Amino acid sequence: MPPWASGALVRRIPTDPCQPIDVLWLPAAAPRLPFGRILLRWEKAPEAGWDVTARLGLATTDVHRATWPAAPDDWPRLVRPTLHEVTGLCSALTVATAALELANRLADS
């Protein structure tokens, strides 16, 4: 990871595990994560492998989603299932929020 980056913003997670995860470097001075976006950060682990963390952008803050300490060199394969889970969670939250807003509008009219 470049020293000027706070992490890598996940843009796309291919279903094929042989395909790389599409990311965009996020500068350290960037504003907080947008809703539903995932930030990956990795650095060499003290003993071996990589210390990898994932953060998730929510409506008012971003939250720590997962940590993989001392992950092996093929850590993208290891984190892929969690990334799919997080994107599914965000999709479900978006649908639930839209349904609640619609229900509130209908109740007010």
Image (cartoon, rainbow, N blue to C red):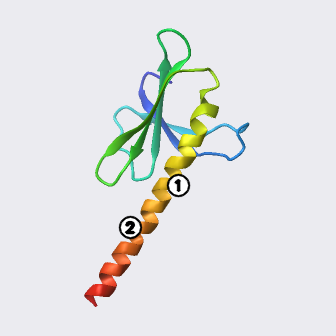
Give the residue type at disc 1.
Answer: Gly
Find the residue positioned furthest to the left: 108
Q: In this view, does 89 lie above or below 100?
A: above
**Disc number for residue 108:** none
Q: Dot 1, crowdedness within 10 Å: few (<14), some or many (≥20)? A: few
Image quadrant in which you'd find residue 105:
bottom left
Q: Which one is nearer the viewer's eye here, 16 or 33? A: 16
Image quadrant in which you'd find residue 73:
top right
Looking at the rendering, in which quadrant would you find the C terminus? bottom left
Counting from the top left corner in percent of width and height, residue 12 is at 59, 47
Find the residue positioned furthest to the bottom: 109
Whether residue 31 is visible, yes or no, is no
Q: Is residue 99 above or below residue 6?
A: below
Q: In this view, does 3 lie above or below 22?
A: above
Residue with the mark numbered 2: 97
Give the residue type at disc 2.
Answer: Thr
Residue with the mark numbered 1: 88
Counting from the top left corner in percent of width and height, residue 54 is at 45, 36
**Which residue is drawn at the image coordinates 54% and 43% (left, top)?**
83
